Image: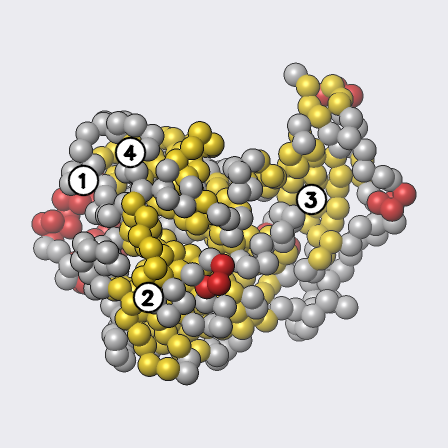
């Protein structure tokens, strides 16, 4: 077996890399080496200390080993995430959308941020889209229905060039394009079964001047419009033009088992796999119990991989029982379905063939407008609103920058520049949206 490339090792300090003097003297060399003769080029130097504005500054060193494998950088992070500097958010939001005031958002889903700071927000419960402006009244731009410009089951919202708003509705298998003011400008019908019989289009995003289509296959092919189907362990991302016509460019990667159909995503609370996002000109996906991200360009070419080895965690039967009880309690308290219907659904979601043997390593992934990658360490459903220390921030090259500490009972919905959009659930289960400015430790 042959491997190609050069290995480089650097230490991560604060929010930037500081190469040692040796890195200036050693030019980057690519050569083919047999595995027994693989050379490790170590850039040595003194340990770096972070002096942050904290009561007790901490000393840490995360090592990143970079190997060029057939022209694709593979970055391996060595060290614990606790060694990263902690980013937080300022205590008061710069913009607040209270859930207990009109239009009374009941179940906040996807959120996107326009260049001027306005928020595009989906309400799952009412199947509506709203634009919230710090200087104007809320504006509804889409409502429930099956006609042009109407929505049922929004899976993604993205902001493109000139603040065009791209909304993918899985129920309708279509992309609706809106102007920055919310006026519909185009509707693109997308192929539901682009990967053939037994496949379902689960999401779509604008990708440069194209559309990225994400499909999963089912182990039991059949009608996916009504009955729940058990997804297989394969996901496919394929490119289509802006008219929705797919081409031959595609990438396949392992997926997690899920119960899903066009109307409802019945993903197991333990199945955060696959995690995938498309933003701007990047596709980022992750898989399994192993902390590994793959980054691809607008033509789906493999640009780099990031691997952060860690201890795999088995999923214990007691955890399954506890999480099922918490999910059942939440669904029942919300009053969305009868207890009998909730239990029947949970029998499917917690079936032995759906629940994995190991906990996934990763949850959601986001890419911001500066191409930083934000990765959520997986949390079980019972911890959904307790995500403190749960996000890792990677710089555009894939090296870790920081870990984000969120306030209790919040989730990260979007990132825009130096701001994050958080959804907070209060003590009476009302949801509120806030835009908060990031706070970072000062590195001297």
26 vs 387, nearest the viewer:
26
Among numbered discs 3 and 4, the one appearing first in the sequence: 3
Along the polypeptide, which appears first: circle 2 or circle 1? 2
Q: How is the image coloured?
A: secondary structure
Q: Residue furthest bottom?
A: 135
Of callouts 2 and 3, the N-terminal one: 3
Q: Residue beneath label 2, please?
A: 183
**Residue drawn at (26%, 27%), measured in percent from left and top?**
197
Task: Kindly state the secondary structure of the residue where label 3 is placed.
Answer: strand
Q: CA distance from mark 3 to mark 1?
A: 46 Å
- Could you say whether the residue bearing mark 2 is in a helix, strand or loop? loop
Residue annotated with mark 3? 64
Q: CA distance from mark 2 to mark 1?
A: 29 Å
Q: CA distance from mark 4 to mark 2?
A: 29 Å
Q: Percent x, y for residue 144? A: 20, 60
Q: Tell me whether the residue at label 3 lies in contact with that at label 1, contact meaning CB atoms closer than 8 angstroms.
A: no
Location of residue 366 in the rendering, given as x and y in whole percent from the top left corner: 48, 54
Say what secondary structure mark 1 lies in: loop
Q: Residues within 10 Å of mark 3 (few under 14, many from 20)?
A: many
Q: CA distance from mark 4 to mark 1?
A: 12 Å
The label number, if any, that marks residue 225 in the structure image: 1
Residue under the image location 73 percent in, 29 percent down: 5
Mark 4 — residue? 193
First along the sequence among labels 4 and 2: 2
Looking at the rendered structure, which numbered label has been put on residue 95?
Answer: none
- Mark 4 residue element: loop
Callout 1 crowding tier (Cα within 10 Å): few <14, some 14–19, many ≥20 = some
């Amino acid at each position: 077996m042959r491997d190609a490339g050069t290995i480089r090792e650097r230490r991560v300090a604060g929010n930037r890399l500081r190469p040692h003097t040796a890195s200036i003297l050693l030019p980057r060399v690519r050569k083919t080496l047999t595995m027994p003769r693989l050379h490790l080029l170590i850039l040595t130097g003194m340990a770096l200390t972070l002096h942050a504005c904290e009561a007790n500054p901490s000393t840490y060193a995360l090592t990143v080993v970079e190997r060029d494998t057939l022209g694709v950088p593979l970055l391996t992070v060595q060290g614990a995430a606790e060694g990263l500097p902690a980013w937080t958010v300022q205590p008061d939001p710069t913009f607040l959308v209270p859930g207990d005031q009109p239009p009374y958002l009941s179940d906040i889903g996807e959120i996107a941020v326009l260049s001027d700071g306005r928020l595009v927000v989906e309400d799952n419960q009412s199947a509506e889209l709203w634009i919230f402006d710090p200087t104007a009244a809320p504006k509804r731009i889409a409502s429930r229905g099956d006609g042009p410009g109407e929505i049922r089951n929004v899976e993604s919202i993205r902001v493109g060039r000139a603040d065009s708003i791209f909304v993918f509705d899985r129920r309708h298998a279509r992309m609706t394009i809106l102007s920055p003011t919310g006026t519909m400008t185009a509707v693109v019908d997308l192929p539901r079964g682009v990967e053939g019989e037994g496949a379902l289009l689960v999401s779509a995003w604008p990708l440069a001047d194209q559309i990225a289509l994400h499909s999963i296959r089912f182990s039991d092919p059949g009608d996916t419009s009504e009955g729940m189907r058990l997804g297989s362990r394969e996901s496919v991302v394929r490119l289509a033009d802006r008219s929705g016509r797919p081409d031959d460019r595609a990438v396949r990667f392992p997926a997690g088992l899920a119960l899903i159909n066009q109307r409802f995503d019945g993903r197991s609370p333990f199945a955060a796999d696959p995690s995938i996002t498309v933003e701007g000109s990047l596709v980022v996906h992750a898989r399994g119990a192993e902390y590994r991200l793959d980054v691809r360009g607008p033509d789906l070419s493999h640009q780099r991989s990031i691997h952060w080895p860690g201890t795999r965690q088995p999923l214990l039967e007691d955890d399954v029982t506890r999480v099922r009880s918490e999910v059942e309690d939440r669904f029942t308290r919300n009053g969305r379905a009868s207890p009998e219907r909730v239990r029947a659904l949970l029998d499917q979601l917690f079936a032995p063939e759906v629940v994995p043997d190991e906990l996934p390593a990763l949850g959601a992934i986001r890419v911001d407008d500066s191409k930083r990658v934000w990765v959520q360490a997986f949390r079980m459903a019972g911890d959904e609103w307790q995500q403190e220390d749960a996000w890792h921030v990677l710089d555009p090259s894939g090296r870790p920058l920081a870990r984000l500490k969120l306030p209790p009972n919040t989730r990260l919905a979007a990132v825009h520049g130096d701001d994050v959009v958080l959804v907070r659930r209060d003590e009476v289960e009302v949801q509120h949206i806030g835009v908060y400015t990031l706070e970072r430790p000062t590195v001297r």
